[in-house]
Amino acid sequence: MSGNTLGLLFTVTSFGESHGAGIGCVVDGCPPGMDLSVEDIQAELDRRKPGTSRHVTQRKEPDTVEILSGIYEGKTTGTPIALLIRNQDQRSQDYGKIVETFRPGHADYTYWHKYGIRDPRGGGRSSARETAVRVAAGAIAKKWLREKYGIEIRGYMSQLGEIAIPFKSWDDVSGNAFFAPNAEIVPQLEDYMDAVRKERDSVGAQITVVAENVPVGLGEPVYDRLDAEIAYAMMNINAVKGVEIGAGFESIAQKGSVHCDELTPTGFASNHAGGILGGISTGQDIVVNLAVKPTSSIAQERHSIDKEGNPVLMATTGRHDPCVGIRATPIAEAMLALVLIDHALRHRAQCGDVKVDTPRIPAKRI
Amino acid sequence: MSGNTLGLLFTVTSFGESHGAGIGCVVDGCPPGMDLSVEDIQAELDRRKPGTSRHVTQRKEPDTVEILSGIYEGKTTGTPIALLIRNQDQRSQDYGKIVETFRPGHADYTYWHKYGIRDPRGGGRSSARETAVRVAAGAIAKKWLREKYGIEIRGYMSQLGEIAIPFKSWDDVSGNAFFAPNAEIVPQLEDYMDAVRKERDSVGAQITVVAENVPVGLGEPVYDRLDAEIAYAMMNINAVKGVEIGAGFESIAQKGSVHCDELTPTGFASNHAGGILGGISTGQDIVVNLAVKPTSSIAQERHSIDKEGNPVLMATTGRHDPCVGIRATPIAEAMLALVLIDHALRHRAQCGDVKVDTPRIPAKRI
Amino acid sequence: MSGNTLGLLFTVTSFGESHGAGIGCVVDGCPPGMDLSVEDIQAELDRRKPGTSRHVTQRKEPDTVEILSGIYEGKTTGTPIALLIRNQDQRSQDYGKIVETFRPGHADYTYWHKYGIRDPRGGGRSSARETAVRVAAGAIAKKWLREKYGIEIRGYMSQLGEIAIPFKSWDDVSGNAFFAPNAEIVPQLEDYMDAVRKERDSVGAQITVVAENVPVGLGEPVYDRLDAEIAYAMMNINAVKGVEIGAGFESIAQKGSVHCDELTPTGFASNHAGGILGGISTGQDIVVNLAVKPTSSIAQERHSIDKEGNPVLMATTGRHDPCVGIRATPIAEAMLALVLIDHALRHRAQCGDVKVDTPRIPAKRI
Amino acid sequence: MSGNTLGLLFTVTSFGESHGAGIGCVVDGCPPGMDLSVEDIQAELDRRKPGTSRHVTQRKEPDTVEILSGIYEGKTTGTPIALLIRNQDQRSQDYGKIVETFRPGHADYTYWHKYGIRDPRGGGRSSARETAVRVAAGAIAKKWLREKYGIEIRGYMSQLGEIAIPFKSWDDVSGNAFFAPNAEIVPQLEDYMDAVRKERDSVGAQITVVAENVPVGLGEPVYDRLDAEIAYAMMNINAVKGVEIGAGFESIAQKGSVHCDELTPTGFASNHAGGILGGISTGQDIVVNLAVKPTSSIAQERHSIDKEGNPVLMATTGRHDPCVGIRATPIAEAMLALVLIDHALRHRAQCGDVKVDTPRIPAKRI
């Protein structure tokens, strides 16, 4: 297992390169008997696909998914669901010049030293194109979690570069290219991105993901804590450099009397824990923040070296996202869904099905 | 596997409760032929053990480790190394009053709902006492990494509550109870902690861990990225609420032209990546920050509920660390060592042994 | 994971050497809330322990088990159950002469070449002494399977050397040292073993294990078939050289019209399948046969070589079982129980709990 | 992981149904830098494909494989190799009548009870068609083992129904439809199969697989013994009911003085062990026998029941192999290759690369 399988019981085994025949995955462990159509998956893929606004890469990929197995008469059968997305818009010529050199900030240097060989076409396996298969697999997980437990997983951009984005409403998220939960701030974000592009630069972002209606009891206690698995899943997303749960890094400067969420007969009084205590879900909202670094591919000239160690100057002129965080929201949602379904199944294995009458103690957001 | 085994090839299977017979683990996959003595392990355990200063819990646990298997004539044999630490200072009476109630901020509530039963003595399995076995297992990993590759793993406290601790010297770290890399600031830290204890409160901290001399090429590319595995390992430490690699959350507001580390024939020009690109080690220092929340057990009265949902007021008067971050440094080092050895072995499996002549490109710290 | 952990969801991680401090294991994944005492486990260990008749090794090991964790007030808590059996009767001097030579038929040669080091005391890790921990872990599995589903797992010796042992009654099994299901044949078995010992030789045996009341539906369909997992578990027992399910090797010469079990409204008409079709349990009895090779340690002189490749003549004069098959029955039962509980939990994870009203179609034994 | 992934480090994740869009797999963990072409894989697939003689199913499947990922300029890159075989000859009408009834001897009954839903078209996921993907993945494993260590894996039919097939020469194996290692006996086999088909019946077979030039030291010592992993792999092949290593079931009646292979300075004196001692390869030939049951699908009328439990009479008139053992040889070879490569990589991880100067002690065949 060379790191291309995610999960223990609901597993996603991913394959494919940016400019090869296609990308895809095998989803194993999906419970049988759930309605599942191509449309269920395509709808999530369309939220992530490139070329939908001037703020993202202009590569034209319809990201059309084919279900190769695991479905009979519109229902999951409990056997592996294989998904295939053929690549369409491969312009390998864009990448010709980087075969012999290492793009700074990219995986070129590390892949070369690890494997002694690398597919340079569009970053090959290290391309963020691979995240489409997570979104596809996550669509299946999301559907099951919603139908079985009423769990709702949603994300939004909470910061773009230096601009914090105050949460206003979930309704605003789908109305703009940034997944910003605040329609009023969108013109400011657009101007900001236009300026970044004009400078031939890129910028980072923060994404927040929330899972609501999670039953109490998901997560293992010592090494596969729910928060640890979430941190693992999120840090596995290309360009993510930090993860926090609940109060996160703010808890460093907090006192115990402030951080620690009191319980009352009608619910938790706060949610600094972010919905997880002792590695196990509390029934409160699970709240996760991710730091996404700025795209390493920029059109400014940068110092680097070639395979022989000679200095080179290189600018990346292909089609790239000036802020990879802009398309990261559906990916982060998918990763959270994949962690939650895996732990829902693990919980069933050891402790039996989640009791429907377990209290879900409401809590204020932080 | 209910979450008590860490790693794929160098595995640690942990057991034990805070106030049961003892705690311990089975380490499987250690390469054969390495010198290993009780002293190698005990030295690390002594760095973490309780009762060594007034700023930590006064529970008296010598944390004496016994090696039950896997060693023959002072050398590892390649078979499982079982470690046992008997508990000595179990004052279960300290915990009697919490059997029927849920301590806020603790795992009591979640364990109860998950399992329908919990061992309330000292937090049972959810106690941070379990981290001793990670330190013990980590000692084995650290030794192998040092002897095989010259990897050095060290950590320090970089913030205590609101007090940032500027890095001055590794030499200062072992000279104070806080693992502070700056002897001058220690009196200030002591006064701060004395004040926190007087207020019957607790406080958070930030720990920084660094691995030096890591070969290029460790880490898997898509789902078991080295940074993802590190995030998983760190978030598995009790009380950790956030993890960042390299520039971490600062990268949100950075431009690509700033964040992206340029390569030169004599090395990387910076290390915002924190030593990992595309999930694989670059040969630079690996730099990780953790946010540790304030201890939930405080002597102030707090609102909570009992098993029947009735409101109660409870203060925790047992022996507790007023800042769990103070003893977290050796644990974080151990976790990083466990991730690195696992990936060193995984790398050997797929790609053969790390080439000794692979360049380790030096880099400035961020 | 260097092969010392068994199972996916109900895992047994084993440690220990024949003449080291002790042997033991960590059982992870046991469902919470089950009554479990030392006696439950000791009763099974006593069935396997050495020194109980003249037909087995005279090593005196009480095999007293200590439960180190995972139990609170007599019930499993869902956390790891660690078991420890201290070694008592270590006569390392018995083994002194074999440090430099390879006992033929033993793992000495292969361990030496694999690890470059081996613990020669009593075979070290390769000793069948390790099977005690499987019996201990299996006792937990057996208890859960019995209480939850009414599954009963029992075994017997079906052949000793050239003597086939016709099944007469389960009641006879516990009344003799051989686990023979036929009291009448026991004197013949005793005479046969006395003769084998007098010849300073050893002999093989066949063990049959049966699981009754297994629900329909346990097992995975393609690679973790229930029969494949059983074959794996049984072949992992020291000295086992063959495994068959149901008709086994007899099915080679059978016609489809004979082998294939017909279904009727009142049950299967036969059980050539041995209770498994398509890798999944049918509800019929699961029937497994194992071939156990003769003990390699015999007191006759045998040709071998030393570490330098020089020829040596060696006879093994320590305390050994003249037929390792005699004590294999409880081990085989334990292994079958460990496979079944793991698949019972896996079934719960993906498909929910086994339906209690699922028909268990009765079937004739083959 | 619902049982569709094989292996720990060289993993095969399989998908697909007999009459769905296609079958395929993701191979993860293949070492980088090996030449690999479609032809390498297709050559093995052609040995297994249906329709090549009158003694096998007449379904026309070219089994053309497409490599979707993991190859760059003709070499493996260390990233996942996805393989896809589209189904061509789906005659679902052949299977229409079995939707409501359970074919005796098939997985229909068990799938239905396990999942509550099943794909009845050609057996769906339980069809032996899935074994094509193992042959494809096994081709990659075989090639690496041959190029890296000179390991050669070959199999043959050693018994057809009641006819034992004495081994004469490896050269004969490829010259007949049965993989019989004895050209003289082929006319007898053909007559036998013609008679079986005329009786509208089926028959079992025994397959023998041999691996030569295996280095000493592959296999884990306690639970992932090489023989246990082989038993698991072989029993995972559809219709296999028994597995034996070396002397296998013959060892029951053997004395230790006969069974136990003596070592001499020039090699082992015999190979009753079948090339494995203590779960680890000895360097001798690994010898494995499998019992393959007769095909359950026969054209004679058989008693069965429908979903409601009503009695039915059913004959299976589709296109079926009258002896599934005939096409089993390439599958068994593939499974052995997949086990060996996984353990070769596991050995590298813990113990470093196999030493090239390790003696491979020759041995007589049994």
Image (cartoon, coloured by chain):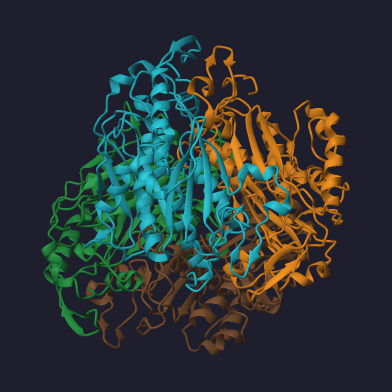
Chain colours: A orange, B cyan, C green, D brown
Q: Is residue B94 above or below residue C347?
A: above
- Residue D44: x and y, percent? 64, 77
Q: Nearer the viewer, residue C332 or B203?
A: B203
- Residue C293: x and y, percent? 30, 67
**Residue D201 visible to the viewer:** no
Tell me which corner region of the image, top left, top right, bottom left or bottom right, holds residue B216. Answer: bottom right
Tell me which corner region of the image, top left, top right, bottom left or bottom right, holds residue D131. Answer: bottom right
**Going by the image, does D48 lie left or right of C32?**
right
- Identify the residue at image location x=50%, y=89%: D169
Quarter the C terminus of chain C occupies: bottom left
- Identify the residue at image location x=82%, y=28%: A171
**Going by the image, does C121 lie left or right of D33?**
left
Q: Nearer the viewer, residue B61 or D316?
A: B61
Q: Nearer the viewer, residue D92 or A121?
A: A121
**Residue C323 visible to the viewer:** yes
Q: Nearer the viewer, residue A7 or A336?
A: A336
**Going by the image, does D18 lie left or right of C120?**
right
**Going by the image, does D207 lie left or right of C117?**
right
